Structures are given as structure tokens and as C-alpha cells.
Image (cartoon, rainbow, N blue to C red):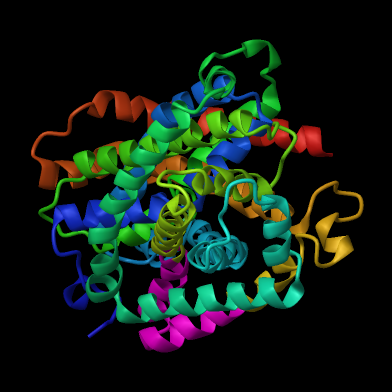
Amino acid sequence: MDAGSPQNRDTWGSKTAFILAAAGSAIGLGNIWGFPTQAGMNGGAAFLVIYLIAVALIGAPVMLAELMIGRHTMRNPIGAFKMLAPGRSWWLIGAMGVFAGVIILSFYSVLAGWTMAYIVKAATGAFTVGVDTEAMFADISARPLSAISWHLAFIVLTIFVVVGGVRDGIERWTKVLMPVLLVLLLLLAVRAVTLPGARTGLEFYLKPDFSAVNFRVVLAAVGQAFFSLSLGMGAMITYGSYLSKKDELVTSAAWVTGLDTFIAFLAGLIIFPTMFATGFDASVQGPSMVFVVLPSLLAAMPPQPYGGLIFGTGFFILLGIAALTSSISLLEVGVTWAVDEKKWPRKKAAILLGSIAFLVGIPSALANGAVDWLTNVPGVGMDFLTLLFTIFGSFALIVGACFISLFVGWKWGVTAAGDEARASDGRFRLEGIWRVLIRFVCPTALLIILIQTLLQTF
Ligand code: TRP
């Protein structure tokens, strides 16, 4: 029996389990670290508005398209395109996805490693009012041994869950912990917006000033939307391939998109008031921003003097778990491919691909103060981690999503794709709008963005 055929594949236990797993993939450092960082660098409220438009017009339709491809073919991204377009080169989109997954995992794990280090800091009482959080961050990220060890620890954890498989590994973890994360974020948001001096931060985040909007802001918003929703590299094709034929597609896609966007919004609601209330300014940029700003909020939580211990430890445990449920989806894309197409045992695939991600990630681990030329890559004006993020966490996803929308809109066809949704959902709500978005709006918008980016870069 062909291991890539639908008969002997694992599936999610229920529609809710799928939604939580897919939301688990989507919700992660991209929401809590990436979104506020991007919004901070790109004008605050104006970025938020453009981000929401990008999610609605481009993110949501592509999310549905990826799930349709996955559920219909029940295959990994490469196998899926080969099945729907035999003998053609469309499978290269899937190949690019597998590759991008390993690269994204390589630096994602560095950031996630920092969150693990913060768990230890918080639990040992380091989060006290007035603590120098910049020094704390440097202690974790700028010492080579520390940065690499935490990166390794996180990759090992990711491999461990992926070896466990879909239902016993991924599903079991996400079902309980995602809801807990949501509650904690709500609590922190309430605390942040009621801080004395929160007003300036809220205005920065919620009162748009469109005069500063330029093409870069649009590019950043669209890239951030794809990264946050885990789109453009086949993660949702892969997760969709484990979706049962009975479970509804359209509402699942809507839930995942909505939850992810809500959590990103909440993260901004936590970070910006805190940032302004505690005297950090928007010049605290790059990957470190959230890691420097958040601990100061956590340290000041009531009841003093234990607030930092309780909320700090709790928050970073949950952030670490949110990162884990995302990183497993990055590794799972390649693992599903190796299991389906190369007939490798799951364990071998996870260990091998995970090890590659670890090695590739070492320069990123050293790019935050440990090694000068990685911290400030000559001629590029950013650190190596941010550079990889820009290429693979943004640009490559936009390329991938552009081809995915062209594929579903014009090659596989909206009617065939729509049939996949109707088979489980009965009625496909908003089908007319989805057709227009996936055939015309998504490819055109993404193509313009890509061309503009290339023109501006070279
Ligand atoms: N979406 C995750 C986050 O926001 C990261 C992630 C997981 C991802 N899988 C992905 C990003 C696939 C792009 C593609 O943290």
C-alpha cells in the first residue's frame, strides 16, 4: 500500500481539534513578537488598519485555498501539486515550501529558545520592578553558549512532539494550552491599558495617521499577515491533509483566521501601552523589542513582590508553548513530505530535518550581539536573523501565496476547489466573493507587491 495514499493517514480527532491545531500553528511568536514589532516600526495604527485589510482580502481566501488543496489531495504540499497537476512544474511551490519551512524553523527556534530562557529567569525571581531588562535580554541572547543551547533545547522539543504524530503529539498539546494562553493575554491586556500613561500608547496603536504610509508599510503588513497565519509555504495544506472529509472547511478557515488576528491585536494592546507607559520608545526595534518591553510589564504585576514571578513564569511558559505549536507545523511540512514521498519513518524524518534546522539556525543564534558581523550584516543594515526573516518569513511566503492563488484560481479551478468545500459544508457561504478574491484580487495584489519589492531592492 502506498503510504502517501489517503487510507492509512492519521486524521484530527474532530473539527475543534483541527481548529485548535491550526490556530496553534498560526498563533505563535508571529503574533506576540512579530506583529507588535512590525506595527511599531511601521507607524502603529495605520499598520494595524492595513494589516486587517490584508488578512480579510488576501489572508483568509488563501487560507481556505490551502486547506482545500490539502483536504482534497490528502497529501504533503509536493505530492498535492503533483496529484492535481501531473507532469507539470507546480510541485515546485511545494518544494519551496518544504525548504522555507526548515529555514523559518531555524531562526524561529532561536527566538523560541529565548522564551524558554525567560521562563527560567522569571521562575528564579529575576522579574522585579525596575530591573534592567535590556541587560537581562543581552545575558540570554548575546552569550554564544546561552543562545545556542536554548536554540538546541527548543529544536529537541519540537522534534519530540512531531515524532509523536498528529493526534497523539500535536493535537494533545494544543487542545488545552491555547485556551489558557488566551485568558492570560486578556488579563495582561486589561492591565496594560489601565496603566498610568497608557494613553499615548493606545493612540499610537489605534489612531491611524495615514500620512506615513508608503509601499514598505503595505509590504510589511502583507508579509506579516502570511507569516502570522502560517500561509504561503504549505503548512495549511499539510494540516488540511489530516482533516476529515466530514469536517467543515469554510468555518474552520474563518475560525483560524479570526483567532489568529484577534491574538495579534491583543498583543499590540499589551505592548504599546506598556512601551509608552514605561518609557521605552519606538526606537527599541528589531527582534529584541518585545523581549525587552514585556518583562517590565510582567515584573510590575500585582500582587507585589510576587507578580513578576507568577505572571512572568506563566506568560513565558504559555508563549513557549504557543511557539512550540507553531514550530511543529514548520517541521511537519517537511516530515509529511519525507514520510509520504520518501517512505522514511516519521522518527527519522523529524530528527534529520530538525537537525538541519538546528545547524542552519546557529548563525541566527549568534546574530544578537554574540558575533559582530552577524549582528550587523555588512552592506545589509540588519542582523542575520532579521535578514532570514525578511527573505523566508516574508518574501518567500508572498511568492508562495501568489502561486497558490493562481493555482487554485486558474489551474485546479474554483469550481473543483468549491466542490471540496461543498462536500463537507453543504452550502459554501460567500463562494462568489471568495472566487473573485482568489482569482483576481490575490494574484494581482501579490504580484504588484513582488514587483515593487524587487524594483526597490535592486
Ligand atoms: N504562524 C506562526 C507564528 O505566527 C509561525 C509559523 C508556523 C509559520 N508555521 C508557519 C509561518 C508556516 C509561516 C509559514 O508564530
Position of the C terminus, as image quadrant, is: top right
Q: Position of residue 146 (x, y in %)?
A: 68, 74
Q: Position of residue 20 (x, y in %)?
A: 26, 54
Depth check, front residue: 249 or 409: 249
Q: Can residue 351 be found in the magenta stretch?
A: yes
Depth check, front residue: 206 or 232: 206
For residue 233, above or below residue 32: below
The magenta stretch is 328-356
Q: Is residue 324 left or right of residue 144?
A: left
Q: Position of residue 372 (x, y in %)?
A: 88, 62
Q: Position of residue 147 (x, y in %)?
A: 68, 71
Q: Residue furthest front?
A: 305
- Which residue corresponds to the image point at 53% horizontal and 24% vertical from the top-left? 196
- Which residue corresponds to the image point at 36% horizontal and 76% vertical from the top-left? 161
Q: Can residue 126 be found in the magenta stretch?
A: no
Q: Is residue 303 left or right of residue 137?
A: left
Whether residue 191 is visible to the viewer of this picture, yes or no, is yes
For residue 395, above or below residue 126: above
Whether residue 85 is visible to the viewer of this picture, yes or no, is no
Q: Is residue 366 left or right of residue 159?
A: right
Depth check, front residue: 282 or 273: 273
Depth check, front residue: 235 or 91: 235
Position of the N terminus, as image quadrant, is: bottom left
Magenta-colored segment: predominant secondary structure: helix
- Which residue corresponds to the image point at 70% horizontal and 16% vertical from the top-left? 212
Image quadrant in which you'd find residue 143: bottom right
How many numbered circles are shown? 0
For residue 393, above or below residue 155: above
